[in-house]
């Protein structure tokens, strides 16, 4: 069992972040913020997929004006993503943001940062302090990659001190990089130096097929070490996929708090006498409306099959015109192959 590091607890609306609370999965809307209806449609789809909080870009005053309407109807806490402008940050806080994401490095006047802090204090909301490798390279374009982790930690330390000096500790920390190894290194360093909740993720990870592996490696490694209180899988595409991948990462580590079915499938080989992949796709379709936490295995042969059946709540196999159903490793039914899916659905319903 993974032992999570101890952190302070931070409130994001009704959501709690920190070591005593479930790891939250988040993403960003990917439509124009001024299109309130489109934003809300996307947010509702994200909620259905298991999203815990959603971040929205507010680069203009028109966006913060739309932000008010989105917050009022959102079914989950809404975070304002702010860059460069103290005015946008303050407008978003006053519009009802549950948290703002801020990179203090791109707000040059410290007086503006203190104005934001005062406003956040007044509204009792959290601030995510973000540092990323791109901003570090902007500061010192010639810094060697091997030295960037130390420089990111140094910048984070200066930001945290600035907030603490102003009496503000309702913080979530994040350090982002597009490099998998550096993402792991810098978050380890932050976890070792601070007791605030940490947002983890690999930035600019790419298209879904390209983002899946590096994001899973970076986020999974850190979570396995007990580091991370909220995660985002960044992909260029549908944000619902970010939530699905994030949930799968949590589930693979036993950290999943969102109930639902899990499907495991034999990898197949020359021993298979049925089309395992085709059967698995049919089973997945049948699981589409299942909300209870149940582990279903589709078995391929007698070599791996018994093990898959023993580790699953319900397992199925087929061959020679027959379908076989197992519950907790014990065979409970033999049916005609064409009736297998209907019987399986009934067994899951009654599980």
Image (cartoon, grey):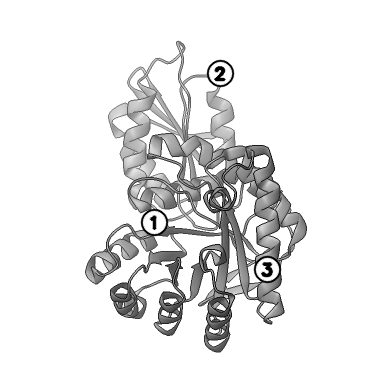
Where residue 170 appears, as percent x and y from the top left, is 63, 75
Query: How busy is the neighbourhood of tag 3: few (under 14 within 10 Å), some, or many (20 plus)?
Result: some
Q: Is residue 232 above or below residue 124?
A: above
Which of these two is toward me, 279 or 3? 3
SS state under label 2: loop
Residue found at the far right of this picture: 192
Say whether residue 309 is left or right of residue 278.
right
Q: Which residue is mark 2?
A: 303
Whole-angstrom CA distance, mark 3 to mark 1, is 33 Å
Q: Which mark is residue 179?
A: none
Which of these two is toward me, 222 or 105? 105
SS state under label 1: helix
Give the mark nearer the N terminus: 2 vs 3. Answer: 3
Q: Is residue 347 above or below residue 301?
A: below
| Quarter location, residue 88 | bottom left
Whole-angstrom CA distance, mark 2 to mark 3, is 55 Å
Say whether residue 280 is left or right of residue 266.
left
Residue depicted at 32% across the width and 60% down the height: 45
| Quarter location, residue 93 | bottom left
Query: How busy is the neighbourhood of tag 2: few (under 14 within 10 Å), some, or many (20 plus)?
Result: few
* Mark in the foreground, 3 or 1: 3
Q: Which residue is mark 3?
A: 160
Where residue 242 appears, as percent x and y from the top left, is 42, 50
Residue depicted at 66% across the width and 60% down the height: 156
Residue depicted at 58% across the width and 46% down the height: 219
Give the mark nearer the N terminus: 1 vs 2. Answer: 1
Q: Which residue is mark 1?
A: 49
Residue found at the far bottom of this picture: 122
């Amino acid at each position: 069992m993974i032992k999570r590091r101890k952190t302070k607890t931070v409130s994001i609306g009704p959501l709690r972040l920190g070591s005593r609370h479930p790891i939250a999965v988040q993403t960003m809307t990917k439509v124009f913020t001024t299109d309130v209806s489109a934003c809300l449609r996307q947010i509702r789809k994200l909620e259905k997929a298991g999203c815990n909080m959603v971040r929205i870009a507010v680069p203009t005053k028109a966006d913060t004006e739309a932000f008010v309407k989105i917050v009022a109807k959102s079914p989950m806490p809404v975070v304002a993503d702010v860059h460069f402008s103290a005015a946008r940050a303050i407008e978003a806080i006053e519009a009802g943001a549950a948290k703002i994401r801020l990179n203090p490095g791109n707000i040059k006047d410290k007086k503006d940062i203190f104005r934001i802090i005062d406003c956040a204090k007044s509204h009792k909301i959290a601030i995510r302090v973000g540092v990323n490798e791109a901003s570090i390279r902007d500061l010192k374009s010639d810094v060697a990659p091997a030295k960037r982790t130390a420089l990111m930690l140094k910048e984070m330390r200066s930001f945290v001190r600035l907030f603490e000096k102003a009496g503000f500790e309702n913080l979530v920390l994040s350090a982002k990089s597009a490099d998998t190894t550096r993402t792991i290194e810098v978050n380890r360093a932050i976890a070792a130096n601070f007791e605030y909740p940490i947002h983890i993720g690999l930035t600019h990870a790419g298209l879904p097929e390209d983002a899946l592996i590096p994001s899973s490696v970076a986020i999974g490694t850190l979570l396995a070490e007990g580091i991370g209180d909220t995660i985002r899988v960044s992909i260029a595409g549908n944000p619902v996929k970010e939530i699905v991948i994030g949930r799968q990462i949590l589930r693979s580590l036993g950290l999943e708090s969102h109930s639902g079915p899990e499907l495991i499938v034999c990898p197949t080989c020359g021993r298979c006498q049925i089309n395992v992949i085709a059967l698995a796709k049919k089973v997945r379709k049948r699981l589409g409306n299942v909300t209870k936490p149940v582990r279903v295995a589709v078995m391929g042969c007698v070599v791996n099959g018994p093990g898959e059946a023993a580790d699953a709540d319900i397992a199925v196999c087929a061959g020679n015109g027959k379908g076989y159903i197992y519950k907790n490793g014990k065979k409970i039914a033999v049916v005609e192959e064409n009736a297998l899916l209907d019987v399986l659905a009934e067994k899951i319903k009654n599980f």
